[in-house]
Image (cartoon, rainbow, N blue to C red):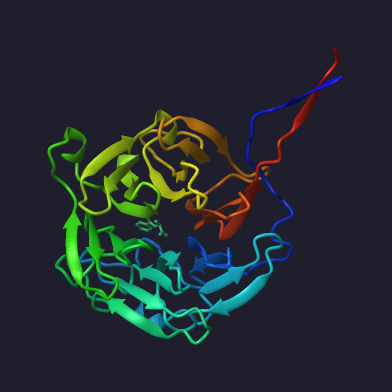
Amino acid sequence: LETVDQDYHFEQVSAWPQSSLQLGQVSGLALDSDSNLVIFHRGDHHWGADSFNNQARYQQRSLGPIQQSAILVVDPSKGSILKASGRNMFFLPHGITADKENNYWVTDVALHQVLKVSSDGKDKTLMALGEAFIPGSDNNHFCQPTDVAVDTESGNIFVSDGYCNARIIKFSADGKYLSEWGAGSSDRRRRIPFHIPHSLVLLPDKKEICVADRENGRIQCFIAETGEFVKEIKKDEFGGEVFAISYSPTGDGLIFAVNGESLSRPVPIRGFVIDYSTKDILDTFSPNKKEFKMPHDIAETRDGSVFVGDASSKSVYKFTTESKFIFIKI
Ligand SMILES: O=C(N[C@@H](O)C(=O)O)c1ccccc1
């Protein structure tokens, strides 16, 4: 008998989490400095067709902030809740990232703000960028900002802004506006402006920022220092929408992405593992029994597990690469 190790493939760990996490719409996932999974969700609030008026103003302030803990720190192996925080401060959570001091940087599309929040359970707001509930597109207003990336070396933070803007803004660690980039540049692929820069990630080993340019169904990467366009990854398999991207924390050059429902180009909704250098799709994956409905964020933990948060099915799915051995009779 000879064993052949099939090249790796992600499979859902269907027994994860061991018990229900009582999640609302899951909007963001992050890896914290203890290598735990952080889930950012909307509790009993929902982003629906009537959540905003046509000036992008949030219409449900009377609901008050979400009373459930919107930020859950979860053990990646069992799915048990280790810490719960973020009560009574968010209206429509969106993106989340943890910095090296384990502070949370989050965006809230109803507040049109980026908030730096302590992770000690006291929910201290250490910094607030943007004016609460006031959309805009100048140096201190966002319009439904979607995500934040922190450059641990320089401390600079990058904000993808947003549903009703089309730019990436760079701030210093203490919140000073430094620069921004969006449409327009020499490269022809940059002449098409962003259409919902929906998720962004810093590639520390490459010093680049990559963006999920959602409605353009593409990933674009830029020099973090200058905003200069580096490359675009656009695949037929994505269909029309790329919702989120993440980068392997071990820096092995793997980009993880999830695509979304596209009426114009219906394709399977899946997770993707992409080789940053070759742009090859190395693997695709989806839940065993159910389908993804609206996979909204994706994160990989240090042990190689990949987590996907689904805003429609209010669930987080875990995937691992159990290499399957195929026994070949000689
Ligand atoms: O994209 C949308 N939502 C998701 O991304 C999300 O929930 O973050 C959306 C857009 C318009 C109306 C309602 C929802």
Query: Relative to 193, is 238 on the left or the right?
Result: right
Query: Relative to 105, is 6 on the left or the right?
Result: right
Q: Residue at x 16, y 39 (%)?
A: 191
Placement of 9 over or under 3, stated as above or below: below
Q: Quadrant of the N terminus?
A: top right
Residue 25 rendering spot, x and y as whole percentages: 50, 63
Residue 269: tell me if it is visible.
no
Q: Nearer the viewer, residue 82 or 1?
A: 1
Q: Quadrant of the C terminus?
A: top right
Query: Relative to 52, is 25 on the left or the right?
Result: right
Count of numbered tags: 0
Q: Residue at x 33, y 50 (%)?
A: 207
Residue 206 rendering spot, x and y as whole percentages: 36, 46
Residue 198 rendering spot, x and y as whole percentages: 35, 54
Quarter of the picture for ligand 1? bottom left
Q: Nearer the viewer, residue 70 or 319?
A: 319
Q: Nearer the viewer, residue 235 or 31?
A: 31
Q: Quadrant of residue 230?
A: top left
Residue 169 rendering spot, x and y as whole percentages: 23, 61
Placement of 279 over or under 250, stated as above or below: above
